[in-house]
Image: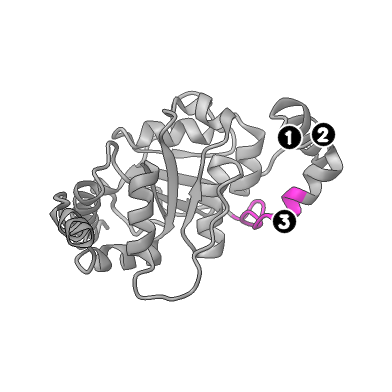
Amino acid sequence: MVDKKIIKLNHSDSNLISKTFQLKYFPIGIKFVKKGGNIFKFPRAKNRKSISAFIKIAVQGAFFYLDKDIISCPGGLKWMGFPSKITETYFYKFFLGKLEKIKSSPEIAEKFIDFLPKPPEEGLYEKMLFTPLKICQFKPDVVVIITTPRYAYQIIIASYLDEYHLVKTIPICAACHGAISIPFTTGELNVSMIDPMSRELGGYKDEEILIGIPYPRFISLIKNIEKTSYNTQKESIFTKVIKEVID
């Protein structure tokens, strides 16, 4: 049964953050689904692609589900916790060393991966749902936003407005890991600079970055917007402060 209150809330929240942070694309909700879980009659995605490409499709209005057979990227399978036939040796030596060339040796690649937050337990989830937040029928696990550094700053500030601890993000990692897996497993907002391969596969512009926000943190963002200077597209408050400082 569809909860109309959730749909109405998601629609309202989507409109608010889209207007406040001048988003070019829809924010999207992503949900991990265990075997036999509700997929809300979502169609399966068409054609095998990387997760970064699926994100770019969803933010433009499409909704669908993914399973392990529709994800083309070995890294994407690993970071989403889907079973993969690739070995750790292949992943460290070929994928990270020779293909992406982000580390100089398999040994360094392995230590780098060990340093990062772990993905969901392999095989625990069978599907992932992708949908624009404005038509989302459920509470998503993670909300993903394509934005720019300017508005990413504002989003982070609003998300942690009532907290004093240092905001830590891991921007240098696979786009799907940084924007989906890390927020999902850690419960904290994360910024992805979008690695070069994901950027190319997804067709992202140079100025675009990803922010992944776990749902409870997203609710904090929504509640805090009215307390910030970002609850209007006008920047007169900043202009006024600057004039006062200069004068």
Graded by Cα atoms within 10 Å as few (under 14), some (14 to 19) or many (20 or more), the crowding at tag 3 reads: few
User: Is residue 82 something one can see in this rendering?
Assistant: no
Q: Quadrant of residue 164?
A: bottom left
Between disc 1 and disc 3, whose residue precedes? 1
In the rendered image, residue 214, in percent from the top left (x then y), is placed at 43, 60
Label 1 packing within 10 angstroms: few (<14), some (14-19), many (20+): many
CB contact under 8 Å: marks 3 and 2: no
Comparing 203 with 122, the one in front is: 203
Up-down: is 196 above or below 29?
A: above
- Element marked by disc 1: helix
- Residue 101: in sight, yes or no? yes
Left or right side of 212 for 230 = left
Residue 118 lies in the magenta-colored region: yes
Which numbered marker is on residue 93?
Answer: 2
Q: Earlier in the sequence, mark 3 or mark 2?
A: 2
Label for residue 96?
A: 1
Horizontally, residue 188 falls left or right of residue 56, namely: right
Q: Nearer the viewer, residue 240 or 217?
A: 240
Which element is circle 2 on?
helix
Amino acid type for the residue under numbered disc 2: Lys
Give how far across and how far down residue 92 sits, in percent. Answer: 79, 38
> Is 24 drawn above or below residue 4 in the view shown?
above
Q: Which amino acid is tagged 3?
A: Phe
Quadrant for the N terminus in the image: bottom left
Name the magenta segment's main secondary structure.
loop
Q: Which mark is residue 115?
A: 3
Residue 22 appears at what percent x and percent y?
23, 43
Q: Which residues are magenta?
A: 112-124
Residues at badges 2 and 1 in contact (C-beta under 8 Å)?
yes
Q: Residue at x 16, y 49 (%)?
A: 233
Q: Is residue 76 above or below residue 80?
A: above
Position of residue 160 relative to residue 63, above or below, is below
